Every structure is written in C-alpha cells, then in structure tokens.
Image (spheres, helix red, strand yellow):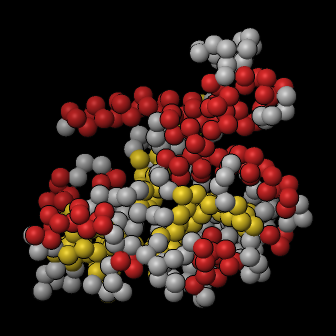
Amino acid sequence: MDLQTLGWNDFFKETFFLYQEKGLHPGRVISRKNNNYVIICEEKLALAKITGKFRYNTQTNKDFPTVGDWVALEMKKQSSHLLIHAVLPRENAFVRKSPISGGRKLKEGVVIGGKTEEQIIASNINTAFIVIGLDNNFEIRRIERYLTLVYHSNINPVIILNKLDLCFSLDDYIKQVKDIAGMVPVHPISAEKGMNMDVFSNYLLPGKTVVFLGSSGVGKSTITNYLLGDEKQKKQSISKSTGKGRHTTTSVELILHHSNGMIIDTPGVRELQLWGDEEILDQSFEDIKQLIYHCKFNNCHHQKEPGCAIQKAIEDNLLSRSRFESYQKQLFELQRLRTKRRDFEKKLNKK
C-alpha cells in the first residue's frame, strides 16, 4: 500500500522534507499501547518506540505520537523496533480535556478537577461520525457537545443515528437533530440489520480517514464490523439492567478498509469535557450567536433585560430554553477552562 493510499499528501510531504534529508522514513501510527507503537511503513506493519531525545524534549502528552499521526522513523538493521524521531505537524486532531481519574465533582453542572491538559484521541481525520443510538441512549445535548469538539478539531462532522430497527418515531428524532445541527448530514441506519449502510461509501474513499465517536453501546463496533465484513472489533451484549453498552473497543486503532480508506474506532466516551476557546461555539451554536448580535445591549445577560433577542426567541418558540441552557453551560465551561489553561501554561514556562 503506497503512502497516498494511507493519506499522505502535499502537506505532509512538505513538512517531511527536513527529515528526509536526514535519511528518515515516513510512517503512520496504527495503534499505541503504553510506550509501544504499531506503525505502517513501507507497506508493512512494524513496532516502534520513541527516542530518548524525543522523550526528553517533550513536555506535554499532546506532543507524543497518537493514532493517525505521521512520524519520522529511523530503521536500525539489528533492532526489532523502529525509532520515532518526530511527529509531523497534524492537519487536525480530535481532542478533549483529559479525563479525570479521581476527585471529580460538579460546579453549575460542569465537571471540575483533574489536570488542565488536552488529550488527543486521533489525528489527520477527514470525517468524524458522531454515532447516536435511536433507543434510550439518545441524548440531544450530547450531540451538541460532540459537535463543539469536532468543529474545534477542524473535522467535517456527520451524524449517524444507529438502531433504526428499534425506532418508531424517526421523523421526531431527525427533527431534534436538525434543529441543533444545521446543515450537518444526518443518516439513520441499522448496522445490526444492515439498513442504509451504503451511506458510508460516500465517505470511505481512497486515502481518506474517518473516525467513529460516541458513547458506549451506540453501536460503533457493530458498524465497524459490518464495514469490515468480519468481527474485527469485539462486540459485547447490552446490559439488561441499565440498557447501556459495556465497553467493546478498549483502545484507539486505525484499520485499513477494502475501499483503501481508513477507519478509526474509539472506545465509548463516558466523560466528554470541552477543550478550546469560547469562539469554538460559533459553529455549534451559530443560531444562538446570531440572536445575541440582535440584543439591544452589548452586555446583555439574556435574562430580563429589555430588547433581549434570546428571551424573545424563547417566548416565540423559535429557540428552546434547554438549548440556550446548554449553550450557557458550555460557555461557562470554556471560560473556566481559559483561566485554568493560563495557570497551567505558566507552570510549564517556569520549568
């Protein structure tokens, strides 16, 4: 498989020129386990590790190789591992705030605690499929959070409504999604029953990379299995007591598809904290941002001020109160994050 089929393009070619002069080779990260990486390089899979110099010069987790990255590799004849000297600049990456392992608590509905650092899930992606189940796992506010992060990551979003075979009010679900997603494509499917699965042929194209995002139990692994034609991703049953899926994918992996496109399946996300600046809401809440521009006062708090376009839209049933509250929650989260990021960067600069 040549580099172009793996997603290599002029952007990576230009950034690799310096490493090519040093005799290094390009490869793409397929998977990572601790400090070991599986790389596809020169049409074959190989194990790789980062060099000691790379580790010494790397301060934050986001600078380490992740699935989907292109890396500069050294091949040693008498070694079973390739050596990763550098990560090439990323075209994009799906990121979130690092999850919290302990000390979690809520403030005004926002999860607080843990390190203020971004976690890169996967990189160099063309399409992000936000997978939602048309069952008791359906949650419109969760879609809003995914859209915010996908837009921030500079990736094209597509919403997949899975488990169509279990749904008896499809039009209502589609309306709810379109009300908050604008022009984002929405595709109802059933991976279990093979319904409408041909939609993926529009996105799985040679050299293109797609990622499946969503909570545990929405059917990401079932979709991946269908598209691959085998049980590549292990499935587990849905818990009868909770209706929620057990984690089926335990790590991020890039999988080659017979279309010469690439699939990245990700573990179910339990904690989806935002990462970015307040401006990332401009796309995911474009309707609200446009209304704010029409408020009478620039410093309107959108409560009881005269001439508030937000409150008028709510009164006229043009905007749901729950959507506006979702916007406020995300805005508060990002404002708080800005302060914590500034403190974190100060600590780094002192080292």
Looking at the image, residue 113 lies above or below residue 54: above
Quarter residue 129 falls in: bottom right
| Closer to the camera in the image, 163 or 183 | 183
Which quadrant, please, contains the N terminus? bottom left
| Closer to the camera in the image, 210 or 349 | 210
Q: Position of residue 237 (x, y in %)?
A: 71, 75
Quarter residue 286 falls in: top right
Q: How many marks?
A: 0
Q: Which residue is pictured at 22% across the width and 79% down the height?
A: 81
Extreme top residue here? 306
Q: Position of residue 162 (x, y in %)?
A: 73, 68
Q: Position of residue 56 (x, y in %)?
A: 17, 54
Q: Which residue is pictured at 74% across the width and 71% down the height?
A: 189
Looking at the image, residue 48 lies above or below residue 44: above
Q: Which residue is pictured at 21% across the width and 84% down the height?
A: 80
Left or right, 15 with reference to 234:
left
Extreme right residue here? 168
| Closer to the camera in the image, 282 or 221 | 282
Left or right, 302 with reference to 340:
right
Q: Which residue is pictured at 85% across the width and 54% down the height?
A: 172
Left or right, 47 with reference to 114:
left
Residue 329 visible at all = no
Q: Position of residue 39 (x, y in %)?
A: 32, 77
Residue 278 visible at all = yes
Which quadrant, please, contains the C terminus? top left
